[in-house]
Amino acid sequence: MGKTYTSIDQVNSDLEILKVKRELHYQKVFRSVENIKEELSPDRLVRNSVGSVASYVKSSGNIQAFLITYILKRFFKRK
């Protein structure tokens, strides 16, 4: 059941509250869209991908040992 108003001031007060709530929701949606656009930018995608690979290599001892060995072999073959 709806709210019963006894004066126009109560109606205006509720309308003002709803107007502020609507603006807050709009700002939240706008901020969310901006964050999504920022997260999906090409430079951010590349940075996140490189960071993920680097953290995987750091957490994996075998891959890390293989990469270090490979890099050292390549380095010493040049000289």
Image (tube, grey):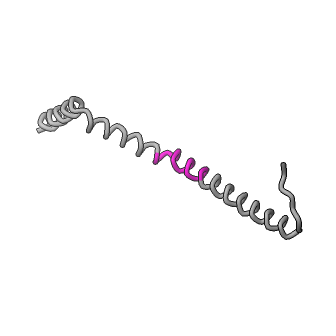
Q: What percent of the width, then of the height, locates residue 3?
A: 83, 56
Q: 49 or 15: nearer the eye?
A: 15
Residue 21 located left or right of residue 46: right
Counting from the top left corner in percent of width and height, residue 27 is at 65, 58
49 to the left or right of 79: right
Residue stretch rendered in magenta on the structure: 32-44
Q: Determine the image quadrant of residue 22.
A: bottom right
Who is closer to the viewer here, 9 or 79?
9
Question: Quick check: 60 above or below 4?
Answer: above
Q: Is residue 36 magenta?
A: yes
Q: Nearer the viewer, residue 67 or 62?
A: 62
Horizontal side, residue 46 vs residue 62: left or right: right
Quadrant of image for the C terminus: top left
Q: Main secondary structure of the magenta part?
A: helix
Give whichever of 7, 42 is nearer the camera: 7
Query: Which residue is rendered at x = 34% and y = 37% of the image?
Result: 53
In the rendered view, would you say 72 is above or below 13?
A: above
Say whether residue 3 is magenta: no
